[in-house]
Image (cartoon, rainbow, N blue to C red):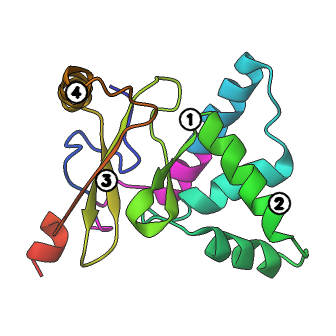
Amino acid sequence: MAPHAHDHDDMSRHDHGATPRHDHGACVKDALARADALCNDRGVRLTPQRARVLELVWSSHKPRGAYAILEDMSADGKRVAPLTVYRALDFLLEQGLIHRIESQNAFVGCPDPGTAHMGQFLVCTCCGEATELTDPRIAATIAESAAAQGFAIQRQTVEVSGICPACRDH
């Protein structure tokens, strides 16, 4: 299993900064390097603007909305049109570099972009962080149940709302 964005083995919880070994700067740098390599392998361009949007998505383990990303890009001193951000997000989604958290209309970085998988997320209603699960049993169960109903799945995103361990401990 690929390293998770939160850099520890238990993918069902996050660190909230409590794990001293988590270096978020390295986390972002690693995500950008993986994205660049993946795009090169696929023959698509990770332009500087697309890379900046990806960096801003990864700037937090909380889902980031398009307008928050746009504000951050504008703070860089360059005027950026909303359509530019949306196009970059669409590209990143198509390449599997990010996931959309549907309930928040926001985006999180994918810790394993080289492997095709369905999005499954634990979303903390207290702190807002989203932790990605990659459990093929969940995706398979949904696919089997949908097929039994004659339903053809085009995209599958599972979001579970609750309280993460770090928030429960406070």
The x and y percentages for residue 71 are: 72, 79
Extent of the magenta region = 16-29
How far separated are the C-alphas under marks 2 and 4? Answer: 39 Å
For marks 1 and 4 on the same chain, the one whose residue lies earlier in the sequence: 1
* Residue for badge 3: 131
Q: Which residue is drawn at 84% across and 49% down?
A: 48
How far separated are the C-alphas under marks 4 and 3? Answer: 30 Å
Label 4 secondary element: loop
Label 1 secondary element: loop
Is residue 125 found left or right of 31 in the rendered image? Answer: left
* Residue for badge 1: 96
Tell me which corner region of the image, top left, top right, bottom left or bottom right, holds residue 143: top left
Specify the amino acid type for callout 4.
Gln
**Tag 1 and tag 4, C-beta contact below 8 Å:** no
How many numbered callouts?
4
Q: Quadrant of the C terminus?
A: bottom left
Q: Is residue 100 visible?
A: yes
For marks 4 and 3 on the same chain, the one whose residue lies earlier in the sequence: 3
For marks 2 and 1 on the same chain, the one whose residue lies earlier in the sequence: 2
Is residue 108 found left or right of 74 in the rendered image? Answer: left
Q: Is residue 52 visible?
A: no
How far separated are the C-alphas under marks 2 and 3? Answer: 27 Å
Q: In which quarter of the image is the N terminus?
A: top left
Residue 23 belongs to magenta span? yes
* Residue for badge 2: 84
The x and y percentages for residue 58 are: 55, 56
